[in-house]
Amino acid sequence: MKNEKITERDVDFAQWYTDVVTAAKLASYSNVKGCVVFEPNGYALWEEIQKLLDQRFKETGHRNVYMPMLIPENLMRKEGELVNGFAPEVAWVTQGGQKDLDERLCIRPTSETLFSDYYASKVRSYRDLPMKYNQWCSVLRWEKETRPFLRSREFLWQEGHTIHETKEEAEKETLDMLNLYNDFFHECLAIPAIIGKKTEKEKFAGAEYTYTVESLMYNGVALQSGTSHYFGQKFSKAYDIKFLSRENKEEYVYQTSWGVSNRMIGALIMVHGDDRGLVLPPKVAPIKVAIIPIGKDEEIINLAYSYKEKLDREGISCYVDDSEKSPGFKFAEAEVNGIPVRIEFGKRDIDDGVITLARRDTGEKVTIGKDSDIITSINGLMEDIQSNLYNKALERRDSMTYEAKSLEEMEKIINEHPGFVKAMWCGDPKCEERIKEIKGTKSRCIPFEEEKISDTCVCCGKEAKHLVIWGIQY
Amino acid sequence: MKNEKITERDVDFAQWYTDVVTAAKLASYSNVKGCVVFEPNGYALWEEIQKLLDQRFKETGHRNVYMPMLIPENLMRKEGELVNGFAPEVAWVTQGGQKDLDERLCIRPTSETLFSDYYASKVRSYRDLPMKYNQWCSVLRWEKETRPFLRSREFLWQEGHTIHETKEEAEKETLDMLNLYNDFFHECLAIPAIIGKKTEKEKFAGAEYTYTVESLMYNGVALQSGTSHYFGQKFSKAYDIKFLSRENKEEYVYQTSWGVSNRMIGALIMVHGDDRGLVLPPKVAPIKVAIIPIGKDEEIINLAYSYKEKLDREGISCYVDDSEKSPGFKFAEAEVNGIPVRIEFGKRDIDDGVITLARRDTGEKVTIGKDSDIITSINGLMEDIQSNLYNKALERRDSMTYEAKSLEEMEKIINEHPGFVKAMWCGDPKCEERIKEIKGTKSRCIPFEEEKISDTCVCCGKEAKHLVIWGIQY
């Protein structure tokens, strides 16, 4: 739990990331290749995120279900594009109960097939629509390179799957869920995301179009942080999801799916973390306050527990560290774990009638009267931290967002400055291919807030159709 | 949603069970053999159970983690008894990313191996102990016959895994968790369980001993509803989980595991359900109250929503059904779904200044003033329902519990009356084998509340060691 264990962020970002994951005890490599163990601190963060998102899903009329984790090969093959998209990266169960199976079963890489099959068996009439279901589960994709929370064979996520009577309603759902994610990123994760549409090349296999939440990490690398897909009738035709319409005609439903994953934990680390470890926005921090009495006087320990009682009563999660460790060690531990606020005080402070509140984001300390209204002080501090983290991330993102009008300019920017590049695009995937040659730069999205920074495609010089945000990705 | 869809419970219990699962929309068969879909009503019930148990786990110092779902064959094989116990019923992944794997991976049937491997890599000293972790996940066992919530290839559960410095502490944990389950069954599920120790023959593969929560269904069939295992140092020696003791010596940890699963939903159905469908104890009912206005007068609808507001404010989950369906249909729907309390009123009631509260368990109705304190009435009713359900189940269990002093008596009882049989046992597994010949009757447990009903084994006539509860099981 010593700070020296963490590599400096500006020296070696990848090593810094690994060090923070380890030092903050978020996850641990396992003896299962490509899979990590979510340790208590990491899983508590996931639970916090889950709780906040789940509430938003339920408030907007979604209900949770649970589908099987195995998908028979035949069922999987019904929608061609999806299979082709996922075939290279699935794991197959071929033996069960000591016998070879007649049909291979794949471990779900995503569950469009199962939801479609289920909906087909349930929907009869327009009165049954919409059906708006969500599932929290783990999925498996046979990735080669893995990094905790960013890319691993098994990961935790939620996948919403909805079916609707009309195109308009399904398209509205696709957009509503994207906005829900965007608000969550803004309000809870304190991450300024860019939302927009994926290009044809980058959209989800099987989708008519894909909306995306893109965020920028401290090192200027982009992270696709959430997606919302509009399927139109592609799956409903492949899986025969029909209903009797208001006009008493048989029609196919319109469908969406949307998901976010434990990548959000990776984003939190890489957007807010610093050389001392994790920094958590108060809204998603499983523990908001560390109370650290200095010394062992009964008076001091009692005061610590009296603060805990007050905070508990307000539902502000906290702990008292009255262990044998040194105060310095305890401070460092609270810091590496990203706990937003630390309360510290010793005998002399109490004699002076004061205690100190230290904020994790800036390291600033304020002194307040020991009998003053601690709840108001802490709530105020947490609000400040939450908005400061967002504003800092927004400033950084803006300062790392460039504009390019020619390919030369684009190459120069990408080679010199990590970050987002705004540039116009003609709509031709060949130009995306060409730009990918620059350190693997990809189109992140066509942002909803379109600007026109020139008339011609940054790559081929033909007439431009869209502004695109480009970047190197995780 | 018509009642006639549900077979009478006393006519065909198995069909009744299936009908209730379907009619209450708890689960649905899927096209994945042996796996069911948890539909919204079923999953909401699981979430409610999960929330209540999770809170109890956390209050007793446990923390949640998440382990990989795949276990490499080599890792699995380290503890011989466990492998032998589970080998016949695991599913193997042999292909991933379009290649045959060098080593097969099994989908977890339980996670002792992974927790042990993890603990071995983390524990250094007695200061790191105890480690008390839990995980909510799904596991897979290649069952041949499957029934929703009772036996299916994939099921949802929680598995707690803890390691301790001393035998005493680990044994205390094993017992504490059993008691926690028992209290939960009593207080929340309203199910009177019998707790005790499994015989050697029936204990968990790899455990030194197994405690169990056994409950009796309406039809007299027993359900093993939860288990808590003491492993001693079996796994710690197999997986090399060592620590430096207070005496600075290398020692192996003492270990436990404990789990309950979605079987609890099966138990709820089979203990409390009736010919009109599901009956839920208020403490675990996801929706506690159905508000059903009769007629479409604005005054009536407004009153319905004003009750909803009041209930919402108190955190009593409810819904207003002002749909086009007939009142009779709405009543039946609330009943089949097991909603504890129904509020109903029409124009005439309001003119008379009254509304009706109907309780699901007994069907009784009470009339209260429409402006009276509805919260107190509902809370009182819910308490009554909760304790009535428990008492009814306890009475039934006691009336279906028999005593046998000879094998002939035992055969006669089992052939004539479904239920538990109390009988003395010498401790020899051969006698368990013999008794199993009577319709598959097994020892459920050696109950903590031992009685001595005779001096000799019910089977062989030799000296008796223990009272055993026997029964036919799901």
Image (cartoon, coloured by chain):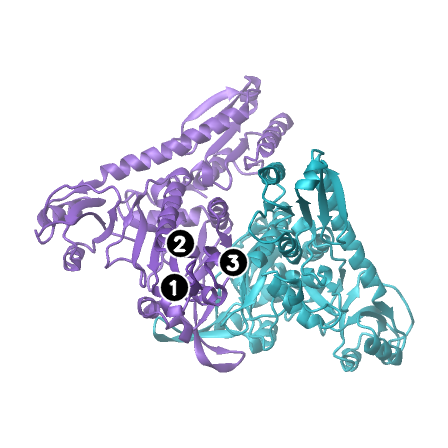
Chain colours: A cyan, B purple
Q: SS of the residue at dot 2?
A: strand
Amino acid bearing label 3: Val
Q: SS of the residue at dot 1?
A: strand
- Label 3, label 2: how far apart the Cα atoms are: 15 Å
Residue B289, image x and y in percent?
A: 51, 34
Q: Is residue B141 visible?
A: no
Residue A292, image x and y in percent?
A: 63, 47
Number of marks: 3
What's the mark number on residue B252?
Answer: 1
Amino acid bearing label 2: Gly
Q: Residues within 10 Å of mark 3 (few under 14, many from 20)?
A: many
Q: Does A379 appear above or below A37?
A: above
* Dot 3 or dot 2, earlier in sequence: 3
* Dot 1 or dot 2, earlier in sequence: 1
**Chain assignment, label 3:** B
What's the mark number on residue B428?
Answer: none
Closer to the eye: label 1 or 3: 1
* Dot 1 or dot 3, earlier in sequence: 3
Q: Nearer the viewer, residue B91 or A332?
A: A332
In the rendered image, which quarter is residue B404 located in? top left
Q: Is the C-beta separation of discs 3 and 2 under 8 Å?
A: no
Q: Does A31 appear above or below A379?
A: below
Residue A214, image x and y in percent?
A: 73, 64
Are callouts 1 and 2 both on one chain? yes
